[in-house]
Image (cartoon, rainbow, N blue to C red):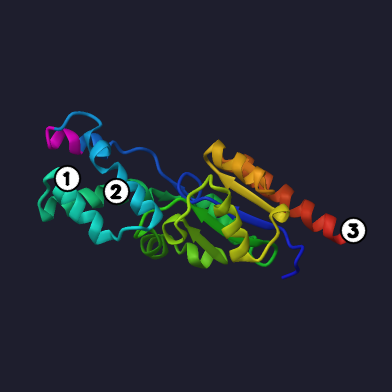
Amino acid sequence: MAENEACLILDIGGVLELTPATGWVQQWETRLRLPPGTVHERMGDVWQAGSLGSIGEQDVHEQLAARLALDASQVEAFMADLWTEYLGTPNEELIAYVRGLRGRCRLGILSNSFVGARERETALYGFDELVERIVYSHEIGIEKPDPRAFEAACAALGVKPERCLFIDDFAVNVEAAGAAGMQGHLFEDNARTIARIAAHVDGVRGATTEL
């Protein structure tokens, strides 16, 4: 592809995956007779470490057992509930649209993730076949909105930030992408997002044609 090709980089959770809250944490706190907020209070540093890849899945399981007094079957059930909410359901309309851009636009993913996400999302949704490169926070040790995350995504694709449109469902990440030299769009619904992507791809292609 040409150096001046348009580039689209998308978030996963809340964009390519629809991930409404399931209430699973509150249900576990009720089941374990723990005060509200206890799970995140006890596990917060573990969640952060998993997001940056400084611990593995087995470490997470061991910390759950130790900090919440769970047996092996409870740990398995707890993690199953975590992944059910994390993975959500595929945003079929947007995924189909992005699939149709292959060959017209450079495609990538930049996701604040959790250790184990690549394997599960590849198996369920095939995102590795949808885009050219996936940059996960737990694999690079950096999370959005750190500017280095956006630099890593551009480097993985070999593209210039100004050619990229970044889609995310958190305004802070969209603003950070803009500060990193990209264009940004806050995902609120498919219709507006698809229109914004189309305008970006056509705009870059038109500008390149005029050069």
Look at the image and tell me in which quarter the N terminus lies. bottom right
The mark tally for this picture is: 3
Query: Mark 2 = which residue?
Result: 46
Confirm or deny contact between disc 2 and disc 1 (CB under 8 A). Answer: yes
Is disc 3 placed on a helix, strand or loop? helix
Query: Which percent across, then down, holds residue 137?
Result: 45, 55
Query: Mark 3 = which residue?
Result: 210
With 36 as the anchor, is 205 left or right in this view? right
The mark that comes first in sequence, 3 or 2, is: 2
- Disc nearest the viewer among 3 and 2: 2
Is disc 1 placed on a helix, strand or loop? helix
Query: Mark 1 = which residue?
Result: 67
The mark that comes first in sequence, 3 or 1, is: 1
Q: Is residue 31 magenta?
A: yes
Q: Is residue 80 magenta?
A: no
Other residues around mark 3 within 10 Å, as few (<14) / some (14–19) / many (≥20): few
Cα–Cα gap, marks 3 and 1:
61 Å
With 202 as the anchor, is 29 left or right in this view? left
Bounds of the magenta segment: 28-33
Look at the image and tell me in which quarter the C terminus lies. bottom right
Q: 101 or 47, which is in the foreground?
A: 47
Q: Residue at x 31, y 45 (%)?
A: 45
Residue type at mark 2 is: Val
Find the residue positioned furthest to the right: 210
Q: Residue at x 30, y 42 (%)?
A: 44
Answer yes or no: is residue 137 visible. yes
- Disc nearest the viewer among 3 and 1: 1
Query: Which percent across, then down, holds residue 110?
Result: 53, 55
Answer yes or no: is residue 188 visible. no
